Image: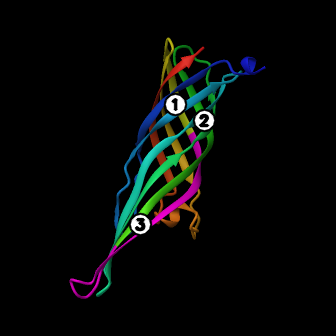
């Protein structure tokens, strides 16, 4: 039964860049644009397929609060893992295999907030550090082209993500720690894998 439904699978790696960056109203973004991680695709009948990825990236920002006799530097850093789960449809075109995809991308992030407080006197300097972890998710729409040579497949693609950023984030939301968080994101990715036929 399973063999009949799953025609083949592809396992490999996927990496790329976030084409849209963070846009904090105050402060500086410390986020890295790269994404990288493993990928698995299972083909289904009628040119459909299911794909699951695990993409790592580094997020962060730094804010400066210039209050009189109570200045502060607040730096937030985070390790982020996205887990896109996508349904794909491949157009039946010879040689090249254009595809469209749609799905959800849960994201789990954990990090630390490092704060330096400056008082009125030079000696009035204090340090604090707080660990945190949170999650959110995005709607994903993508398109790309698959190419295969023997068992090796290469698939460049572009993805549009719309993150679920609440207006007033709670402590379990990533945006609570990386506010203001970007709501829309565009990713350019390249997947390289080994296909079992």
State which region is magenta.
116-141
Q: CA distance from mark 1 to mark 2?
A: 9 Å
Give the percent coordinates (x, y) of residue 87: 65, 34
- Horizontal side of residue 140 vs 124, given as left or right: right
Circles 1 and 2: CB distance less than 8 Å?
yes
The residue carrying pointer 3 sits among few (fewer than 14), some (14 to 19) or many (20 or more) residues within 10 Å by Cα, namely: some
Q: Is residue 65 visible?
A: no
Q: Which residue is mark 3?
A: 113
Of residues 159 and 115, which is closer to you in this image?
115
- Horizontal side of residue 49 vs 144, given as left or right: right
Which quadrant is home to the C terminus? top right
Q: Nearer the viewer, mark 3 or mark 1?
A: 3
Q: CA distance from mark 3 to mark 1?
A: 38 Å
Q: Is residue 107 within the magenta segment? A: no
Q: Is residue 10 visible?
A: yes
Q: CA distance from mark 3 to mark 2?
A: 36 Å
Disc number placed over residue 101 in the picture, else none: 2
Give the percent coordinates (x, y) of residue 85: 62, 39
Residue appearing at x 28%, y 85% in the figure? 119
Element type at mark 1: strand
Q: Which residue is mark 1?
A: 144
Element type at mark 2: strand
Of residues 3 and 102, which is closer to you in this image?
3
Indicate which disc, 3 or 1, sits on the residue closer to the N terminus.
3
The residue carrying pointer 1 sits among few (fewer than 14), some (14 to 19) or many (20 or more) residues within 10 Å by Cα, namely: some
């Amino acid at each position: 039964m399973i063999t009949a439904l799953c025609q083949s699978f592809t396992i490999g790696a996927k990496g790329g860049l976030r084409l849209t960056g963070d846009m904090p109203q105050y402060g500086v973004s410390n986020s890295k644009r790269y994404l990288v991680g493993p990928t698995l695709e299972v083909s289904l009948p009628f040119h459909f397929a299911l794909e699951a990825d695990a993409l790592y990236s580094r997020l962060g920002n730094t804010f400066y609060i210039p209050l009189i006799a109570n200045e502060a530097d607040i730096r937030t850093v985070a390790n982020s893992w996205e887990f896109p789960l996508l349904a794909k449809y491949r157009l039946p075109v010879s040689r090249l295999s254009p595809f469209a995809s749609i799905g959800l991308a849960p994201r789990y992030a954990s990090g630390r907030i490092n704060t330096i407080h400056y008082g009125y006197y030079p000696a009035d300097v204090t340090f604090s550090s707080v660990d945190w972890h949170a999650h959110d998710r995005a709607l994903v729409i993508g398109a790309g082209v698959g190419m295969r040579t023997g068992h090796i497949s290469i698939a460049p693609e572009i993805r549009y993500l719309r993150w679920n950023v609440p207006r007033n984030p709670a402590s379990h939301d990533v945006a609570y720690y990386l506010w203001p968080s970007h709501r829309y994101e565009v990713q350019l990715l390249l997947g390289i894998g080994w296909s079992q036929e």
